[in-house]
Image: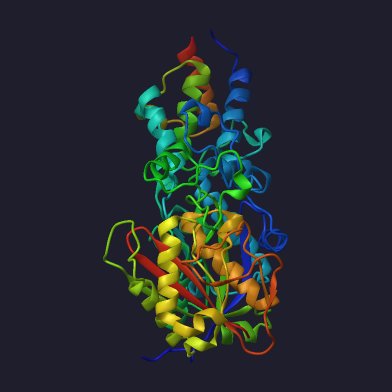
Amino acid sequence: MTSNRDRRVVVTGLGATTPLGGTATETWEALLAGRSGARTMDFDWVAKYELPVTFAATIATPPIDVLAKVETRRLDPSSQYALIAAREAWADAGAPEIDPERLGAAIGSGIGGVWTLLDQWDVLKEKGPRRVYPLAVPMLMPNGPAAAVSLDLGARAGAHTTVSACASGAESMGYAIDMIRTGRADVVVAGGTEAAVHPLPISGFAAMQALSTRNDDPARASRPYDTGRDGFVLGEGAAVIVLESEEHARARGARIYAELASVGMSADAHHITAPEPNGSGASRAMLYAVERADLSPTDIIHINVHATSTPVGDVAEYNAIKRAFGDHTENMSVTATKSMTGHLLGAAGALEAVITIQSIYHRLVPATINLDDQDPEIPLNVVTGEHQKLPDGDIAALNNSFGFGGHNVALAVRSI
Amino acid sequence: MAQSEQEILEGLAEIVNEETGLDTASVEMDKSFTEDLDIDSLSMMTIVVNAEEKFGVRIPDSEVKNLKTVRDAVTFIAGAQS
């Protein structure tokens, strides 16, 4: 298989608004400090609907503190988060001057504009069709965030939305790599967003027993690989990166964080929500990513894992890693940053890609928190306690993301 | 209850500000909604529906296309109130 790395794709800008901070840097610093973004929800609807889960990793900086009031009125929260992260990433990249027809946008979302959809349904029932907001449809459509970013930055090479549940954000970055490799664009703003801390998704996830119910101790609830894990902690936010052909970035003297070397994708075709227990689908995604990045499995020294803190999912991912990497598995340092960020669904893969890029750039792996008693079925080399220094020289890492529906996405990041 | 044209103008300016972010002072009688204030048809529909609620009037959809300037809207609302 050819890697097609003759047109290398590099990362020149980072942006994020997350439960840990209003920017990518704030988020990174909170990760190094080992902070949890999970907190008890003080929304009136928690008690009103007697929700079985009363906490979530809610956004740290409300959009109204960042955006113009009219933007918060005319955009669903999922688009607001995406716009905030995209503007940060764009500024971080030095706001490159570019022909708009060579600039693309790819923003994924797992659920889309659920707040708008259900708020407007209430308006319809209570006040009638004439009172439904004329912008309801563009606000609720899942491509709304990609459209908002495209409009804001004037990206005319294409605006795309990948939808693959919790792999959406990572898949959008894979799509962006392809846009640049195939010559459709020189620069692509890519990422994922989610704003689903809403009683309906919470009730749905709770009904399927996917959420932690550790209501009395939110900060300790997300505990990937711990024997006491009891489900994931719902998070929200967005993460966006600026991807560029290396040639374009070098020509303008841009700071380059890392190379986003490849994406590997596969589908389980096994079950709508359960991962394939032997991990063959996920391991194929990882190996495709390694191969297309011109690497050998033993070149991977770090994995930012998907690890959501569910009893079944965490084991399945270990099985996939072991299947792909064999004896090399124990040599790789692993971190599960959802222990701090919660699970941002369609933004999760994008946020963890940002963290993986930061890890390669700063040569530091943030420690996983809440891992008090590691599951003996998951003998991975997990970074705990202190963050871990990565070696100098050429290094490479993977970021795994998996989604309901059997979607497997692995991104490979190489140092520059 | 009928309001003065000035009161209607001020109320309308608040609605326009809420929907578009435009400064209330920019909403003047002789301004065109589309040409001067750059208000698109979707925003216009929101402004119309909010104005109906605020001023206790009904503005038929067929009438909206005739409301070209702020004065057109104020005059229509004043007439509908009386």
Color theme of the render: rainbow
Residue A108 point in image, percent of width and height: 45, 60
In the image, residue A281 sits, relative to residue A159, either above or below, namely: below
In the image, residue A83 sits, relative to residue A55, either above or below, namely: below
Of B8 and A50, nearer the camera is: A50
Q: At 53% across and 72% down in the image, what residue appears?
A: A380
Q: Can residue A173 be seen in this view?
A: yes
Residue A117 point in image, percent of width and height: 40, 40
> Looking at the rendering, which quadrant does residue B66 occupy?
top left
Of A409 and A179, nearer the camera is: A409
Please state if A26 lies on the left or on the right of A121 as rendered.
right
Which quadrant holds the C terminus of chain A? bottom right
> Looking at the rendering, which quadrant does residue A363 occupy?
bottom right
Q: At 65% across and 54% down in the image, what residue appears?
A: A20
Which quadrant holds the N terminus of chain A? bottom left
Of A314 and A12, nearer the camera is: A314
- Figure disc tally: 0
Residue A362 point in image, percent of width and height: 70, 75
> Looking at the rendering, which quadrant does residue A310 occupy?
bottom left
In the image, residue A280 sits, relative to residue A199, either above or below, namely: below
Q: At 55% across and 28% down in the image, what residue appears?
A: A44
Residue A279 point in image, percent of width and height: 36, 71
Q: Is residue A158 visible?
A: no
Q: At 52% across and 32% down in the image, what residue appears?
A: A46
